[in-house]
Amino acid sequence: MAYFSFARSIVAGEPITLYADARRDFTYIDDVVKGCVGALDTAGRSTGNARSGKKTGPAPLRVYNLGNTSPVPVTRMVAILEKLLGKKANKRVVAMPSNGDVPFTHANVSHAAHDFGYRPTTSLDAGLRHFVDWFVDYYKLDAKIVKATGAVADKKKPATTKKKAAAGKSASS
């Protein structure tokens, strides 16, 4: 979940490391959940004996690849985060390491599409907008958020909570 790590670093003013030319197939969680729920209905009956649990044949299961099928440069994802958070990232671009990571991911969802109609519907822009709305609200951050309408709205930390205000009054009395 690079976008979460990147958002935290952008807000904190910490550097983020990007691999040159890396492209990823980012998928919004709602699309993944729809795929998981859809896959549940494709499993056949168990081949296990109800009493002993012993299998009489292979498991009637299938593995599905779920993704968005639209790889984008990671730098584009970071640019969207910068816009939504209202703050520039401190980017450090490095060469892709020769071991450990891959330069490109792309989900082949053809089996899921055929078997249960899986079709991801959330664009990267919309998914990141939902994520940043949650992120700013959850962490009570001061940030300008670009709403779906394109309007900019300020979200501010609450000045104080009722509990803190009450505690402050009783301490100063």
Image (cartoon, rainbow, N blue to C red):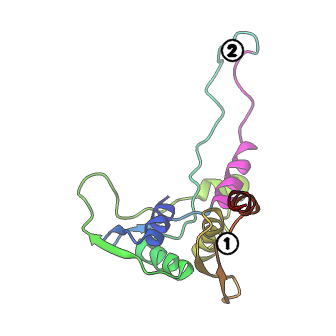
Q: In the rendering, which numbered label is found on residue 159?
A: 1
Q: Tell me if residue 34 is in the magenta stretch.
A: yes
Which quadrant holds the C terminus? bottom right
**The image quarter in which residue 163 lies:** bottom right
The foreground one among 164 and 34 is 164
Side of 96 relative to 31 (left or right): left
Residue 135: x %, y % from top left: 60, 65
Q: List the single residue furthest toward the bottom.
A: 151
Circle 2 sits in a helix, a strand or a loop, which is it?
loop
Q: Which residues are magenta?
A: 29-49
Residue for point 49% across, 68% down:
7
Residue 141: x %, y % from top left: 59, 70
The foreground one among 77 and 155 is 155
State the residue position of label 2: 53
Is residue 31 positioned above or below 58 on the image?
A: below
Label 1 to label 2: alpha-carbon separation? 60 Å
Is residue 77 positioned above or below 135 on the image?
A: below
Residue 96: x %, y % from top left: 27, 64
Side of 47 relative to 23 (left or right): right
Packing grade of label 1 (10 A; few <14, some 14-19, many >=20) is few
